[in-house]
Amino acid sequence: MNETANPDCRILVLAPFGKDGVLITGVLRQSGYAAEVIHDPRAITRCMSGSAGAAIISEEVLSDQNINAIAQSAVAQPSWSDFPLIVLTRGGASTPFSEKAMRACASMGNVTLLERPLRPATLQSTVQAALRARLRQYEIRDHLEERKRAEEELRRAHDSLESLVEQRTRALQELSLRLMRVQDSERRRIARELHDGMGQYLTAAKINLNVLASNAKNPRALAEAGKALDQAISDMRTLSYLLHPPLLDEVGFDSAARWYVEGFSERSGIEVKMNINIPIKRLPEAVELAFFRILQEALTNVHRHSGSRQVEVNLSARAKNMVLEVKDYGCGLPRDLLDRFQKDGTGTGVGLAGIRERLKELGGELMISSGESGTTLGALIPLPGPSMIDQPGPAKSSIPA
Ligand SMILES: Nc1ncnc2c1ncn2[C@@H]1O[C@H](COP(=O)(O)OP(=O)(O)OP(=O)(O)O)[C@@H](O)[C@H]1O
Ligand SMILES: [Mg+2]
């Protein structure tokens, strides 16, 4: 920064008595400084925070009132500023007035005393030193402002990144919900197709085979074909029911769950204890479907990951909520996986994430407690309507409400 051309480096000269003001500004201007005579001490207090380089004040101006005003402004300066004041003192012996004024100077901040009569070289070197200090202060000011700007930009970038992440997360959640809905309706459709389409053809083929069997040349081959068809019909029915059990739509969660659990137990060899208490005849369709899919996934997880030979399934009402619990006695979820999932919902497969999304869509909540002695998965869904807390159904619960 070139101090002679910079208006922030002006030298203010407050010396209203005698010719000091004119002489000082003359000397400074000759040396290339922008010096300016002022008549009001308030001009100094106004400039302390940045629009002048230094001020020269003659001692006679320092009344109590002016000293106080300057001291107050010195205290109120921004952190980077320490405005240089050069006070011209009288030469010769001190007087009580000059001593008092000098003591008071201490409160005015960065003060240098310069004794009169002034020598131009002394004046110039004092002003030069003051301006150098002031320029350093400006550098610190610029640096602080730059840092503040950078911080502000960083904050803005951080905010916009956060809102972008939020938007993307919302979009992903919507997408995964849509995918789950599509998957549900697709499963329902394929189940119906299998049952009503292929199932009917297979049954018709079986009937015809029975007719042919009465006068067959190779009854053994026909009997084997019949067995194969029976197996195909049975497998197709199981597949269709697993995709979407018609019981769920026709009779409700209770029957569909019992049917599913029975088959699961047979297929996996895992013993399942069930305790289902639904205080109303039917739960809303979306709730029944969600509980059924959650039960399927939870039991599949027990079979695939836990190593447990026993499971308990409880469905009970708590106040306005229905709570499905699936409790096993296996190895438990890996600690870090559980921590991550509970912290921000990441780190698992599609299964647990899907359960959480389903529950969230219905205003519900997924609770998992897991340790070395097993895992309990709790799926809570609030129901519309009055509280069901007094309704029958003392289901055993291991997750606090
Ligand atoms: N009952 C359980 N006992 C022990 N670990 C489990 C249990 N349930 C889940 N886990 C652990 O949590 C992980 C995530 O489960 P999640 O159902 O989300 O995914 P996955 O079963 O691995 O795959 P998929 O996407 O097919 O469901 C599992 O890989 C397993 O390590
Ligand atoms: Mg799974």
Image (spheres, rainbow, N blue to C red):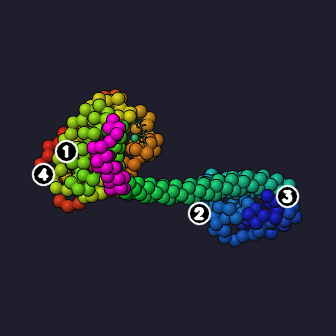
* Apparent side of residue 206 relative to residue 173 in the rendered image (left or right): left
Which residue is denoted by mark 1 in the rendering? Answer: 276
CA–CA distance between discs 4 and 1? 13 Å
The amino acid type of the residue labelled 2 equals: Ala
Spatial CA distance of label 3 from label 1 is 103 Å
Q: In which quadrant will I find the N terminus?
A: bottom right
**Closer to viewer: mark 3 or mark 1:** 1
Q: Name the residue that disc number 4 marks.
A: 391
Mark nearer the viewer, 4 or 1: 1
Choose between 132 and 84: the one closer to the eye.
132
Name the element at disc 1.
strand
**Residue where numbered disc 3 is placed:** 120
Question: Is there any visible trace of residue 229 in the rendered image?
Answer: yes
Q: Quadrant of the C terminus?
A: top left
Sequence order check, earlier mark of 1 and 2: 2
Task: Sort mark 3 into few (<14), some (14-19) or many (20+) by Cα contacts within 10 Å.
Answer: some
Residue in front for this viewpoint, 160 or 39: 160
Q: Quadrant of residue 46?
A: bottom right
Point out residue 89 in the picture as x, y percentages from the top left corner: 72, 57
Q: Is residue 53 magenta?
A: no
Q: Disc 1 and disc 2: Cα gap in Å?
A: 83 Å
Sequence-wise, which precedes: disc 3 or disc 1?
Answer: 3
Disc nearer the start of the sequence (4/2): 2
Q: Position of residue 122 (x, y in %)?
A: 82, 53
Classify the position of ligand 1 by quadrant: top left, top right, bottom left or bottom right. Answer: top left
Instruction: Give the amino acid type for the residue marked by disc 3 in the picture.
Output: Pro
Front position among marks 4 and 2: 4
Q: Callout 1: 10 Å neighbours few (<14), some, many (20+)? A: many
